[in-house]
Image (tube, rainbow, N blue to C red):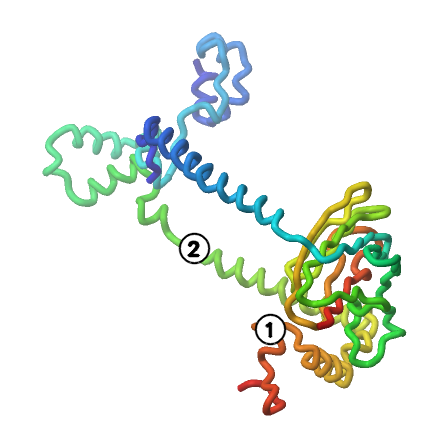
């Protein structure tokens, strides 16, 4: 009996291997996760167990008072009864946090670091651009495409005014 | 809060599965029929064969005499200022406008794809198979395209150039 009391106080059911405990508990050991637990969840508003398992003397007295008419309870007593049953109120469990600032800051930091890597790459890794990117080449190329009337309906040549010899406004 | 009490609406689920399926079949069948019908109305003036190799195209004009030539991309060193890099070729495919043309496309080694987007053409070149595409160009000019099926190291460097002359 002493062994079971010690174990239940400490709460370490994993160590319930002693014969003494076995003889008084059920034959099959219950794992922690299969026992009813207290949760604060929006979508599970009434947890299976109360938050406070072992009531102090004053709390026990309050529970006795609860059995009588509730209009005789003061506001503080009602709150105390609530806090026996529940750990956090809905407002508390749904509170926001400042985590988003950390996340956004971290993301921006790494994006900036990536930009540094790209700048380094452009300077030290990549070779020169091909000749066809030179301004004169592009100008000759564009002139050739306009002479060919490339995509005259909605594309390049449609943006050129052939009468005035300039881009359409 | 999660909603766990709405489930099991078998009749509705069946109806809104079967009915759209029927509607889609009613749309698809005439559409497919029209698609296949449009393939048959053509009567091309002449036929050109286009054979893909790694990494160039061969064109054969065999209707009136035998003209066969290869079309390689112009290497950057051979370009004149104003040429289109990676697009210009040494021998272009010269065709007349306003003439329905049949292109028979195949490949000698691996998969390629003969594409000229400005004319709405894309046909895969498959070794051991002859694919056909027909088109009629209405505007004279030079039309460019690039091989559209990964075919090895120089897949990006085997363009197609059509020169349509009036």
Q: Is residue A50 visible?
A: no
Q: Chain of mark 1?
A: A
- Viewer-proximal residue, A53 or A111? A111
- Viewer-proximal residue, A84 or A9? A84
Farthest residue toward the bottom?
A: A164
Q: Chain of mark 2?
A: A
| In this view, the mark in front (1 or 2) | 1
Q: Position of residue B72 (x, y in %)?
A: 86, 63
Q: Quadrant of residue B155?
A: bottom right
Mark 2 neighbour class, 10 Å CA radius: few under 14, some 14 to 19, many 20 or more = few
Q: Secondary structure at mark 1?
A: loop
- Viewer-proximal residue, A67 or A121? A121
Q: Quadrant of residue A48?
A: top left
Q: Is residue A79 above or below residue B46?
A: above
Q: Secondary structure at mark 2?
A: loop
Is there a contact, CB below 8 Å, between mark 1 and mark 2?
no
Q: Is residue B68 above or below residue B164?
A: above
- Viewer-proximal residue, A128 or A46? A128
Pointer 2 residue: A97
Residue at the spot 38% in from the left edge and 34% down from the top edge:
B19
Q: Position of residue A12 (x, y in %)?
A: 50, 25
Please indicate whether residue B4 sits to the left or right of residue A143 in the image. left
Pointer 1 residue: A155
Q: Position of residue B93 (x, y in %)?
A: 79, 64
Residue at the spot 76% in from the left edge and 71% down from the top edge:
A122
Residue at the spot 53% in from the left edge and 46% down from the top edge:
B34
Q: Quadrant of residue A76?
A: top left
Q: Position of residue A33 (x, y in %)?
A: 48, 26
């Amino acid at each position: 009996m002493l062994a079971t009391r010690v174990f239940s106080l400490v709460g370490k059911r994993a160590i319930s291997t002693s014969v003494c405990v076995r003889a008084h508990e059920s034959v099959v050991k219950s794992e922690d996760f299969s026992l009813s637990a207290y949760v604060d969840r929006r979508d599970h508003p009434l947890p299976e167990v109360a938050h406070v398992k072992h009531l102090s003397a004053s709390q026990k007295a309050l529970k006795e008072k609860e059995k009588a008419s509730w209009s005789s309870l003061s506001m503080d007593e009602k709150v105390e009864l609530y806090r026996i049953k529940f750990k956090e109120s809905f407002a508390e469990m749904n509170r926001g946090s400042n985590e988003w600032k950390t996340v956004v800051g971290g993301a921006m930091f790494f994006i900036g670091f990536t930009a540094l890597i790209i700048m380094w790459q452009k300077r030290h890794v990549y070779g020169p651009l091909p000749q066809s990117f030179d301004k004169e080449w592009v100008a000759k190329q564009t002139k050739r495409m306009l002479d060919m009337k490339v995509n005259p309906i909605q594309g390049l040549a449609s943006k050129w005014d052939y009468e005035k010899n300039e881009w359409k406004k | 809060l999660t909603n766990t009490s709405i489930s099991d609406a078998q009749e509705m689920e069946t109806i809104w599965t079967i009915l759209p399926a029927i509607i889609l079949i009613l749309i698809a069948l005439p559409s497919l029929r029209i698609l296949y019908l449009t393939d048959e109305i053509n009567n091309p003036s002449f036929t050109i064969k286009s054979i893909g190799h790694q990494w160039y195209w061969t064109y054969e004009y065999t209707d009136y005499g035998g003209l066969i030539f290869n079309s390689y991309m112009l290497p950057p060193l051979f370009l004149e200022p104003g040429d289109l890099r990676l697009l210009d070729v040494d021998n272009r495919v010269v065709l007349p406008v306003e003439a329905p043309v049949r292109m028979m496309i195949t490949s000698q080694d691996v998969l390629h794809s003969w594409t000229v987007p400005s004319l709405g053409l894309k046909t895969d070149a498959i070794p051991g198979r002859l694919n056909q595409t027909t088109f009629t160009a209405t505007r004279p000019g030079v039309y460019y395209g690039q091989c559209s099926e990964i075919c090895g190291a120089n897949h990006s460097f085997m363009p197609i150039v059509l020169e349509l002359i009036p």
